[in-house]
Amino acid sequence: MDISIHASFLPHDGPEAALVFYRDVLGFEVRGDAGHAGMRWITVGPPGHPETSLVLHPAIADPHLSDDERRTIVEMMAKGTFAMVLLATDDVDATFELLAARGADVVQEPIDQPYGVRDCAFRDPAGNLIRLQERP
């Protein structure tokens, strides 16, 4: 069996801010930008890797959510505890410096973790945690 990850979803609370972060700060390609009922779903991904994408979606667009669930999602996003993604790079220190210089919201500077990776962390404009680790 050959299964791979094609796309993963991260919520946004403002499509323009999400677009600026993922396109201009991270340098991802915009692969799709679809709107419906005043909301936007933006598909982005790393250049040279068309097989892997992130879909930035309106966090509370699911019509099956209750009002309480929507409030909880908004609260968790504001605290940065709702969603995260783990990205990889060949040189975490150089990438950290570039992203910090581009204005990314730094959560953790590069560090050698006790579980064997060197990583750092940022938050996107919606509060999603973006962990970035160095490839072995």
Image: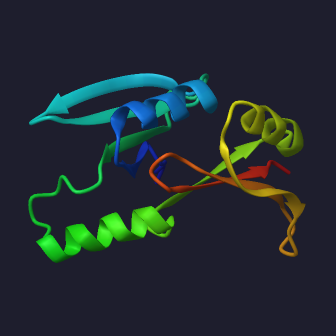
Residue 113, quarter of the rendered image: bottom right
- Residue 78 shown left or right of residue 14 in the figure: right
Rendering colour mode: rainbow
Tell me the residue at 50%/28% (across/down).
20
- Residue 79 shown left or right of residue 106 in the figure: left
- Residue 82 shown left or right of residue 134 in the figure: left
Total numbered labels placed on residues in the image: 0
Measured as percent of width and height from the top left, residue 114 is found at 88, 75
Tell me the residue at 22%/67% (across/down).
70
Above/below status of 102 relative to 104: above
Measured as percent of width and height from the top left, residue 101 is found at 77, 32
Measured as percent of width and height from the top left, residue 128 is found at 50, 56
Tell me the residue at 83%/37% (across/down).
97
Above/below status of 105 relative to 32: below
Tell me the residue at 56%/28% (across/down).
28
- Residue 6 shown left or right of residue 101 in the figure: left
Measured as percent of width and height from the top left, residue 135 is found at 80, 48
Above/below status of 72 relative to 135: below
Residue 65, quarter of the rendered image: bottom left
